[in-house]
Image (spheres, helix red, strand yellow):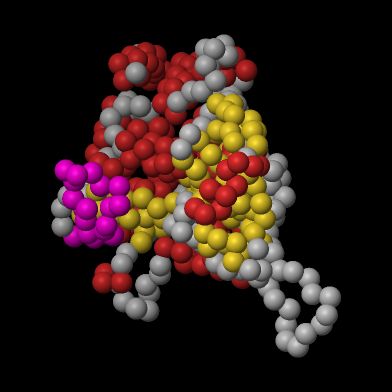
Amino acid sequence: MDTLHPLLVSLQEVFKRSHKKGQLFSAVILAMILPIGTAMSSHVHRKLEQVLYFGINKTRFYRFMASKKINWDNIWEKIFRLIPSSTTHDRLIVALDDSMTPKSGKKIFGCEHFFDHAAKHNQSQYPWSQCFVQIGLLNFIHTRWAFLPLLTRFYCSVSKATESNFKSKIIIACELLYKLSTWSDSQILVVTDSWFGNGKLYNKLRADIGGSVEVLTMLRKNSTLCGLPLEHVVKKLGRPPKYGSRAGSVKELAIKYKTQAREVTSLVYGKERKMFVYDEIFMSKAFKCKIKVVFTYYKNHFVALATTDLNLTVEQILEYYSARWKIESGFKELKHDIGSQKSQVRLETSVKNHLNMCMLSITIIWIATMSLSKQCVDELTHNGIKSQYSFSQARKLLVNQYNKLRVCKNDTNLQKNNKALWLNLIIKLAA
């Protein structure tokens, strides 16, 4: 059963006034999904004409790719509604992070010399690149966690923006999460790294969204925690203390509680692993509330995970935070598998449209994978021998199913030119 075709058809409903634009939009997304070449605009146009046989003039194609009339807010909301099961344990588990895309050339929208903390010794620490903040849904699809991109926005430094329109990464992230909260009434759990996971993000989200949002993050070793306030029997003047005495830094507490750690089993990085953990509730002056801290020990190392959702179990905290790594895998899928990094567009609308189209193609692939039959899932996991499967495997399987659907249709052009067999041959060569 083909699950990709209905999603591509539903995309056309966003373009109600122009049926031709809707067909072109779904054809462009399909061309990006095909595991042939990259997502460069020239490659996409070539795949439209030579593989999908969608005849379109170059001028019209490039005007469409740079169109200012594509309403991405409506498109992403439509895609979010198409997700079969968006919640996990009645929560929307949302991953948040930022990423950089190195570029070459001048006068490219969003390009600056950003600092790259992950640069190697033979690489520049300030590459000429684009920086964007992205949020997406973490969902368990069949046998593995996956990252479904949903919203993104480009970031620029103060030097490239006026003081009136400058927005920090924290503010951008809060705006994206607020937009996502308007699409669903479910509780949101934001899973992020230690850079975003602080009081600035959490307190701003609480003010904008309310009590339906929680944060799961990793604490830095020099972060200071406080004990719970003591209840005083004798009433004193002034307000009661909100924080208890200083408990110590994260490093000090991890050393202190190491002998009291207990063993738990949780799904961490795709496998059931035994971990030694110790959990305790502290007061945080950064978050200005109670947080649940889980000290995880592995050999001579430790990691301190913290969440504002006190109802989460230790096993859930370990599993959800390990699933956060899928957003890093998602950046790799976006830049290299789909090929957005090799894009050569320069104008603002072209850059934004191209990045959103690449993200949309990934999300559609994962949504279609969620609706696969048991036979197709067995094909992905080799009849249960392997518990994990890759994004590329799911992508090629969906394209093969779509190709079979095209063969079954009574299309004289396909039969005349043997195009379906030609597409199947190209997919096998690309594999």
Q: Quadrant of the C terminus?
A: top left
* Residue furthest bottom in the image: 237
* Residue furthest right in the image: 233
Residue at 58 percent of width and 33 percent of height: 275
Q: Does the segment drawn in magenta span residue 122?
A: yes
Question: Residue 41 at what x, y percent from top left?
Answer: 27, 42
> Does residue 337 sit above or below 71 in this rendering?
above
- Left or right: residue 183 versus residue 240 is left
> Does residue 344 sit above or below 2 in this rendering?
below
Question: Residue 413 at what x, y percent from top left?
Answer: 38, 20
- Left or right: residue 70 versus residue 177 is left
Q: Main secondary structure of the magenta part?
A: loop
- For the question of whether residue 211 can be seen, the reply is yes
Q: How many marks?
A: 0
Task: State which region is magenta.
Answer: 107-127
- For the question of whether residue 20 can be seen, the reply is no
- Left or right: residue 235 versus residue 26 is right
Residue at 41 percent of width and 26 percent of height: 392
Residue 6 or residue 274, whichever sits in front: 274
Residue 59 or residue 400, whichever sits in front: 400
- Left or right: residue 24 versus residue 182 is left
Residue 360: image quadrant is top left
> Does residue 199 sit above or below 74 in this rendering?
below
Question: Residue 173 at what x, y percent from top left?
Answer: 48, 60
Residue at 33 percent of width and 55 percent of height: 131
Q: Does the segment drawn in magenta span residue 110?
A: yes
Residue 50: image quadrant is top left
Residue at 61 percent of width and 64 percent of height: 226
Question: Residue 146 at what x, y percent from top left?
Answer: 52, 35
Q: Quadrant of the N terminus?
A: top right
